[in-house]
Amino acid sequence: MLVLGVETSCDETSVSIVLDGKQVLSNVIYTQIDIHKVYGGVVPEVASRHHLRKITHVFDQAFEQANVKPEDIDLVAVTSHPGLIGSLLVGINAAKTFALAYGKKCIEVDHIVGHIYANYIESDFDFPMIALVVSGGHTELVLIKDHYDFTVLGETLDDAVGEAYDKVGRVMDLQYPAGAKVDKLAHEGKPTYKLPVVYVDKDSYNFSFSGLKSAVLNEVNKCHMKGEEINIADLACSFQTSVVKVLTDKTIKAALDYKVKQIVVAGGVAANRGLRESLSAAAEQNNLKLTFPKMVYCTDNAAMIAVAGYFKNKYQA
Ligand code: KG4
Ligand code: ZN
């Protein structure tokens, strides 16, 4: 089955063609990061306009690279939520117009479910599984008993992890999106700053990152006021150590509590080197199968939407 995936929920315009939920024939991503970084974040109105400008070209490239004709597509899958409404509308309109013109079925896919299914490109799923979802807008632990059977066990009560990375990066004068830059700096420093590791409460699967974020901002302000130089690499390392510790501990606890066969990590922060190292070591210690998506499938892309659409069509639609 050939699935055409379309993703325009934020600042990436992406179209992909995937065979049987697994083999990525094309995955074209046009990123608007350079446009938004001068504003320090995504400007919704600007994002919609750029999706509109690029979407037809990205469609054409996806077909060209996959060497597939529009008539060959069996199913169209498009991100319907969550995301910026103006941006989502561009993708939804394009996908539905394509489906109508060629007489194809079109189904809507949840963006977060797409992030989870990015793992399927790497590895088959052994149920039950725990998904750690860590993106710019979401931080969740999800129990997955079977395809398209999701129970959210816990989530962030305030900032998402990616959001905390971006805000901490901002006070360190790093350009948006700062997550990968903070990650790189963290590997050049030592965890010398005393920062909180917030568990909300020990048995809960919920997270909270705003206190940690404020603690980092306080350190920076204190140094500015005293006229002292701040060691950015050490501060990044201390911040990352706190984040990674709580993410690792809660994920392993959920995996053991629910006796799962696999852990998958999803979303932009799944690219984080510190998280990959820490979770890999903890999973190995506890004899748990762990998968991360390939780097290119960690951040927003349409291949993950096509894979999720393939399974939604099979098990739910
Ligand atoms: O999943 P994603 O592409 O977009 C959303 O759906 O939100 O995630 C983007 C987020 C941004 O906040 C970015 O700073 C963060 O993922 N990110 C990282 C890393 N790479 C991207 N955060 C920490 N470490 C990284 N290596
Ligand atoms: Zn995303």
Image (cartoon, rainbow, N blue to C red):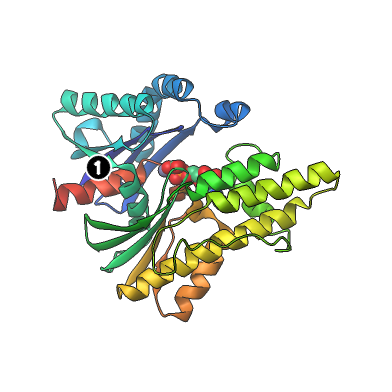
**Relative vertical location of residue 89 with respect to residue 254 in this rendering, above or below:** above
Q: Is residue 201 left or right of residue 245?
A: left
| Quarter of the picture holding the C terminus | top left
Indicate if the residue with disc 1 has its beta carbon within 8 Å of ligand 2: no
Q: Measuring from the top left, give residue 133's x and y in whole percent.
A: 40, 54
**Relative vertical location of residue 304 with respect to residue 39 in this rendering, above or below:** below
Instruction: Depth check: give the residue in front, 279 or 195.
Output: 195
Q: Please tell me how many numbered marks the rendered image carries.
A: 1
Residue 192 image-quadrant placement:
bottom right
Q: Measuring from the top left, give residue 182's x and y in whole percent.
A: 64, 50
Residue at far right of view: 227
Residue 300 visible, this angle: no
Q: Is residue 199 left or right of residue 196?
A: left
Residue, disc 1: 3
Amino acid type at mark 1? Val
Q: Residues within 10 Å of mark 1 (few under 14, many from 20)?
A: many
Q: Measuring from the top left, give residue 101's x and y in whole percent.
A: 18, 23
Residue positioned 39% across, 75% down in the render: 288
Residue 151 visible, this angle: yes
Q: Is residue 226 left or right of residue 167?
A: right
Residue positioned 67% across, 59% down in the render: 237
Q: Measuring from the top left, give residue 47's x and y in whole percent.
A: 46, 25
**Relative vertical location of residue 59 with respect to residue 244 in this rendering, above or below:** above
Instruction: Depth check: give the residue in front, 175 or 231.
Output: 231
Q: Is residue 34 left or right of residue 48?
A: right
Residue 10 image-quadrant placement:
top left
Mark 1: secondary structure? strand
Residue positioned 49% across, 74% down in the render: 282
Residue positioned 44% across, 60% down in the render: 292
